[in-house]
Image: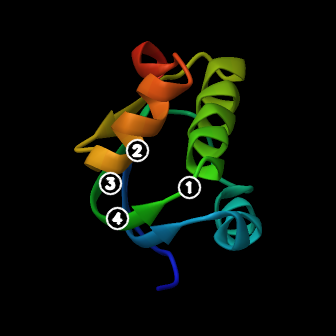
């Protein structure tokens, strides 16, 4: 299932799958984002993730930090939380 992103001001709603194959399109869709405000990313409709989802979240957080902003992850799927715990980065999600 491909990843879809809806942009509603500073709320990004992701749905579908966040996998290695989807990352380039996500980077392309978000690369020109004006980081003038903090962002909330809603993952409640994400159905499948792999470890690249963690890398994507960290990339968003790095971009926000460079611009003195914050990325907040809302409603992460259970499998993402399990991966984060496995890699010892659950506090970063």
Comparing marks 3 and 1, which lies closer to the viewer? 1
Q: Secondary structure at mark 2?
A: helix
Depth check, mark 2 against mark 3: the one in front is 2
Q: Is residue 24 above or below residue 78?
A: below
Percent of width and height locating residue 7: 41, 64
Q: Is residue 74 above or below residue 50?
A: above
> Relative to 27, does residue 6 appear above or below in the rendering?
below
Between the residue at mark 3 and the residue at mark 1, the CA separation in whole angstroms equals 14 Å
Rendered image quadrant of residue 65 = top right
Disc marking residue 46: 4
The reply to whether the C-beta atoms of the residues labelled 3 and 4 are less than 8 Å apart is yes
Between 23 and 5, the one lying in front of the other is 23
Q: How is the image coloured?
A: rainbow
Q: Are marks 2 and 3 in contact (CB under 8 Å)?
A: yes
- Which residue is identified by label 2? 80
Observer-nearest of 69 and 55:
55
In space, the residues marked 3 and 4 are separated at their CA atoms by: 5 Å
C-alpha separation, residue under disc 2 versus residue under disc 4: 10 Å
Q: Is residue 86 left or right of residue 75?
A: right
The nearer-to-camera label among 2 and 4 is 2
Query: Which residue position holds label 3?
Result: 43
């Amino acid at each position: 299932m491909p990843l879809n992103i809806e942009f509603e001001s500073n709320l990004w709603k992701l749905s579908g799958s966040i996998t290695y194959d989807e990352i380039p399109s996500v980077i392309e869709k978000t690369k020109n984002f004006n980081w003038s405000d903090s962002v909330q990313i809603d993952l409640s409709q994400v159905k499948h993730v792999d470890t690249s989802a963690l890398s994507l979240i960290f990339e968003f957080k790095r971009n926000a930090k460079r611009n003195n902003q914050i990325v907040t992850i809302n409603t992460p799927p259970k499998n993402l939380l399990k991966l984060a715990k496995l890699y010892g980065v659950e506090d970063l999600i």
